[in-house]
Image: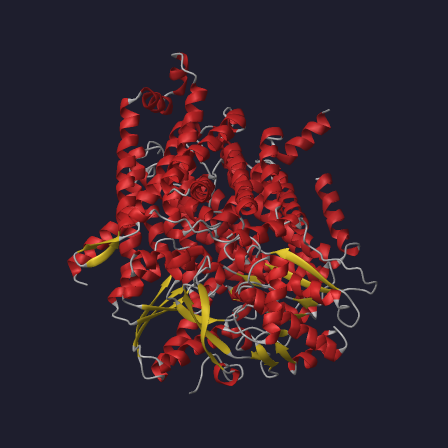
């Protein structure tokens, strides 16, 4: 394989990985930005998305159907949880959210095991996406290109949503000054529920996208949680742009780092996180110091 | 003081009545209690929330494990040395972490713990990598230290460490040093303006916290006879933080109760059902909703009525 | 897929499956079984439990062992060695077990075996692969009824000697079993006069194998030896299919199991490798076993279910010979135990407590009418060629 082909294919690999990480990170950072909640259960929602996606494919026979159904169901479940339980805890300090989302992770993990079993489940990708293209004579899966594209499209959609729509404006305003928004007549509680639901829905759709590549399995949640945290910490808690940058940085470092220094792949990630935090304690684009 | 003495006497007498299986469980609960209490020192009294306290535990465990495996130093001394060593390493960690405050501080502690985990995973000669260290002996030595290797003796060693640490921590929080910590917790800017070098105080309390946490880890290694990378993993950091919160932060005693509660409930639940995680998670959520001040808060409320 | 789900529902329905009680009046023979029922190794641990429960039920129906019913005490270790030590201690101290099964991961077993002497308990392994358990970490109370990592690697290398492939690369999970097996493989390749072009290890929990697939392609290897299991294995096979890796490189895996095949479906076709047990082994005992298993679980028995059953039979043979479950009487009886197993004749070896047995090479093929591809036996090798010398992990010829 010549060097150019290698470079191009690895960059595309990194982009597809970044897309998956972005789905996770974006949701978490949105939730943190508005509600100051560190959603420990975020990985569990990602996993739930994969399993719900599997069921959706099983029932409807269509992957596209799963892409629509899963985020709605997972996001809906998230919003319901927020309305039922999280809502009561806003006056309290951060400890409560940590405990509650930790408890939720435990419950979701076990519930998924009871409902879907302990074996990894295969999610078929649609025939149209299962082929390969030749990039500089090297075979590259179409599905990964699709993933990279989906990530970019989602990023654009969310960006426009935050900038142009009323709800987006409310979300941005609430993250900066919730009281003022409330004083101006908006029910901040609804904004919070919506945001939590959207954040979980994003994690859920990430799970559906990931499933054909990695299979739906019970190990997804713990791995996803730590990855997501790293991205969001690097990018800056609460910063949407930061989550994009964080996802790209982590993905590129993972791909090229594990190629050139496989022994240090694991340590690399945390070293970068540490360095960035020391230099900029709030993360690259974070608001907190 | 009387309460403490009463509890000490009760715990000291327990081995005479309990079956060996319960003794093992209780010893482990006390080790966890020490671990949780050590975290409370920084979380409850200085509002320095660490997401990486497993680093202290793992450091203590690996250090003690290596000492016991490769030297002739008797058990009690190995444990103490490992604890102190963790505290010293923590000074460096704290120095970096206290560059930030709030959530960023917490994230830095997490980053350190994960880095330690990643390093331990690869450093086969020292940590045995993913296999960990197995067959850690309870090395005997002179002055009757052989006693501590027995089941009952080890229990008393653990008890002594827990009580010693508790008295130490309590003395710290009641001292002028502790008053400054509380000042930092309530209003750091004001404390700073009063002329205190708050960062030094923070570094000191983190080091103490890690030292006691390392002591707990150092006890764990010869207890299980085994140490591995899971002891450094973020899941353990999350669990010990939960223990502190469940027990009641800023009380020292609360986290002890929280740890015992957590361990016993998890043990018993997992014996009866595969789906223990479901029940366990529900318990946490219920705790937050109905007992926000933790177990100690509940107990105090009861007493008040 | 329905079969698997039903199986797991059966497990859940047996809600508190901690104990299998029996109607015989005698004091039961208690066997503690700490296994990973949840966590990344959960699927394997669940298989082990099924194997043991099946054996216990069958044996109790026939009158138990020495007239006593078997009582299994299964506990979940979540695949964590520290929890495994704790659970093993529980079943020994609280429940009075002197016999142990289970311990899904080699790391769990390695953590527990130093304590066996203190507990005076005997552990019969059914799935631990790490060579050190019968080598440098050997303890007298440990017995291994299953094929070990070095043995399955040896089977593969013997097969490759006869084949046309000349250059090999290896990819393994970055922990004990991965390093151990690839080390043995490298040794074997050199001994066969072939070329070993390189190896790489992926962290446990790797989700994206694109970098590793690139490395395999670039190495110029004709065959790639894989030492992966569980979720990592499933992810790798899926992605290898995405990249059409098998067009260029023959994938050879150290364990071919039904679970992975079901997880990745057609992506497994063409995979060749060693296996420790497969339902298609053709002998009267296995055919009867498979038929009975299908009646019970409505599915074919998978690798670890078969291996666990064999381990149970081995322990049973020892107890019946010694007429006791006391460790000092049982140990010598086990050391010379011989059984006519579902895998043919298997004999325990006294010097390192490894059961000497043959190995299998299978290839995954598409079968008309079957929902999933099936592993077909390609060739077998006899035990004396496949088992290393006493306390060794490598081979001399």
Judging from the image, the colouring scheme is secondary structure
Image quarter (top left, top right, bottom left or bottom right) of the C terminus of chain C: bottom left
Residue C108 found in image quarter: bottom right
Counting the numbered discs, the total is 0
Q: Which residue appears at 60% of the width and 31% of the height? A: B293
> Where residue A124 sits in the image (x, y, percent)?
39, 49
Name the one closer to the observer, A147 or A191: A147
Question: Is residue A211 visible to us here?
Answer: yes
Name the one closer to the observer, A70 or B192: A70
Q: Residue furthest front?
A: C369
> Where residue B180 sits in the image (x, y, percent)?
49, 34
Q: Which residue appears at 46% of the width and 60% of the height? A: C370
Q: Using the image, determine if residue B163 lies above or below residue C215.
A: above
Q: Residue furthest bottom?
A: C397
Name the one closer to the observer, C183 or C161: C161
In the displayed structure, does residue A4 sit left or right of residue C137? left
Question: Is residue B221 visible to us here?
Answer: no
In the displayed structure, does residue C360 sit left or right of residue B269? left
Q: Using the image, determine if residue C188 lies above or below residue C70.
A: below
> Where residue C317 sits in the image (x, y, percent)?
69, 76
Residue A231 found in image quarter: top left
Q: Using the image, determine if residue B286 lies above or below residue C174.
A: above
Residue A75 found in image quarter: top left
Q: Residue furthest right?
A: C25
> Where residue C218 sits in the image (x, y, percent)?
24, 65
In the displayed structure, does residue C261 sit left or right of residue A284? right
């Amino acid at each position: 394989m010549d060097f150019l082909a290698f470079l191009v294919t690895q960059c595309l690999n990194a982009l597809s990985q970044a897309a998956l990480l972005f789905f996770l990170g974006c949701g978490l950072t949105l939730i943190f930005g508005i509600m100051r909640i560190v959603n420990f259960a975020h990985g569990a929602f990602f996993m739930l998305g994969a399993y719900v996606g599997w069921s959706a494919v099983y029932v409807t026979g269509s992957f596209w159907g799963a892409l629509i159904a899963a985020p709605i169901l997972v996001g809906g479940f998230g919003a319901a949880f927020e309305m039922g339980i999280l809502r009561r805890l806003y006056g309290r300090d951060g400890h409560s959210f940590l405990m509650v989302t930790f408890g939720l992770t435990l419950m979701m993990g076990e519930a998924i095991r009871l409902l879907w079993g302990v074996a990894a489940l295969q999610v078929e990708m649609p025939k149209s996406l299962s082929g390969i293209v030749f990039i500089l004579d090297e075979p590259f899966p179409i599905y990964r290109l699709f993933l990279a594209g989906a990530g970019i499209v989602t990023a654009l959609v969310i960006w426009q949503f935050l900038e142009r729509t009323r709800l987006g404006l409310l979300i941005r305003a609430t993250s900066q000054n919730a009281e003022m928004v409330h004083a101006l007549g908006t029910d901040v509680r609804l904004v919070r529920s919506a945001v939590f639901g959207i954040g979980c829905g994003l994690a859920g759709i990430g799970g559906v996208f990931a499933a054909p590549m990695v299979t739906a399995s019970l190990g997804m949640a713990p791995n996803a949680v730590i990855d997501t945290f790293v991205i969001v910490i690097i990018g800056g808690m609460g910063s949407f742009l930061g989550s994009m940058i964080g996802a790209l940085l982590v993905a590129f470092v993972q791909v090229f780092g594990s190629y050139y220094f496989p022994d240090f792949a694991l340590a690399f990630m945390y070293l970068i996180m540490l360095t960035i935090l020391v230099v900029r304690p709030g993360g690259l684009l974070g608001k907190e110091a | 003081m009387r309460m403490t003495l009463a509890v000490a006497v009760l715990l000291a007498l327990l081995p005479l009545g309990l079956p060996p299986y319960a003794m093992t469980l209780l010893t482990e609960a006390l080790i966890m209690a020490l671990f949780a209490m050590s975290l409370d020192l920084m979380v409850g009294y200085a509002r320095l929330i660490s997401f990486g306290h497993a680093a202290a535990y793992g450091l203590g465990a690996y250090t003690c494990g290596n000492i016991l495996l490769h030297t002739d130093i008797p058990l009690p001394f190995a444990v103490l040395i490992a604890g102190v060593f963790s505290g010293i390493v923590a000074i460096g960690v704290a120095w970096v972490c206290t560059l930030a405050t709030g959530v960023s501080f917490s994230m830095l502690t997490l980053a350190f713990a994960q880095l330690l985990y990643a390093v331990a995973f690869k450093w086969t000669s020292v940590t045995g990598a993913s296999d960990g260290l197995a067959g850690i002996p309870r090395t005997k030595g002179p002055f009757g230290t052989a006693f501590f290797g027995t089941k009952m003796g080890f229990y008393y060693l653990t008890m002594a460490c827990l009580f010693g640490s508790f008295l130490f921590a309590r003395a710290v929080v009641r001292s002028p040093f502790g008053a400054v910590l509380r000042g930092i917790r309530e209003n750091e800017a004001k404390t700073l303006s009063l002329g205190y070098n708050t960062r030094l105080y923070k570094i000191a309390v983190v080091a103490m916290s890690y030292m006691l946490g390392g002591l707990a880890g150092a006890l764990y290694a010869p207890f299980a006879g085994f140490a591995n990378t899971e002891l450094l993993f973020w899941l353990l950091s999350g669990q010990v933080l939960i223990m502190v919160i469940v027990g009641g932060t800023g009380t020292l005693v609360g986290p002890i109760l929280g740890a015992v509660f957590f361990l016993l409930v998890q043990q018993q639940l997992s014996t009866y059902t595969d789906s223990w995680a479901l029940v366990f998670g529900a318990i946490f959520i219920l705790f937050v909703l109905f007992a926000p001040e933790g177990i100690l808060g509940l107990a105090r409320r009861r007493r008040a009525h | 897929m329905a079969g698997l789900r039903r199986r797991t529902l059966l497990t859940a329905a047996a809600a508190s499956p901690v104990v299998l009680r029996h109607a015989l009046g005698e004091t039961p023979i208690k066997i503690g079984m700490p296994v990973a029922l949840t966590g990344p190794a959960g699927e394997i641990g669940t298989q082990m439990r099924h194997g043991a429960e099946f054996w216990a039920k069958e044996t109790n129906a026939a009158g138990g062992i020495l007239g006593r019913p078997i009582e299994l005490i299964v506990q979940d270790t979540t695949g964590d060695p520290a929890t495994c030590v704790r659970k093993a201690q529980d079943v020994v101290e609280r429940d009075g077990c002197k016999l142990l099964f289970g311990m899904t991961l080699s790391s769990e077993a390695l953590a527990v075996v130093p304590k066996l002497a203190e507990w005076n308990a005997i552990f019969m392994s059914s799935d631990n692969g790490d060579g050190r358990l019968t080598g440098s970490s050997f303890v007298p109370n440990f017995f291994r009824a299953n094929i070990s990592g070095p043995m399955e690697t040896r089977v593969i290398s013997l097969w490759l000697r006869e084949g046309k492939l000349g250059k090999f690369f290896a990819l393994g999970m970055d922990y004990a079993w991965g390093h151990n097996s690839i080390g043995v493989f490298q040794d074997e390749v050199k001994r066969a006069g072939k070329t070993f072009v390189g190896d790489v290890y992926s962290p446990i929990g790797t989700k994206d194998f694109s970098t590793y697939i690139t490395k395999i392609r670039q190495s110029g290897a004709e065959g790639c030896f894989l030492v992966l299991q569980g979720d990592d294995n499933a992810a790798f096979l899926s992605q290898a299919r995405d990249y059409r890796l098998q067009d260029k490189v023959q994938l050879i895996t150290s364990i071919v199991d039904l679970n992975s095949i079901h997880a990745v479906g057609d992506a497994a076709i063409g995979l060749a490798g060693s296996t420790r047990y497969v339902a298609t082994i053709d002998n009267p005992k296995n055919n009867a076993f498979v038929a009975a298993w299908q009646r019970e679980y409505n599915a074919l028995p998978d690798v670890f279910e078969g291996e666990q059953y064999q381990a149970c039979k081995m322990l049973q043979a020892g107890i019946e010979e010694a007429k006791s479950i006391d460790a000092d009487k049982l140990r010598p009886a086990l050391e010379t135990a011989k059984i006519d197993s579902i895998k043919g004749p298997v004999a325990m070896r006294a010097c390192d407590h490894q059961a000497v047995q043959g190995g299998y090479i299978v290839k995954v093929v598409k079968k008309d009418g079957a929902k999933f591809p099936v592993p077909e036996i390609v060739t077998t090798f006899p035990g004396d060629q496949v088992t290393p010398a006493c306390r060794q992990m490598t081979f001399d010829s």
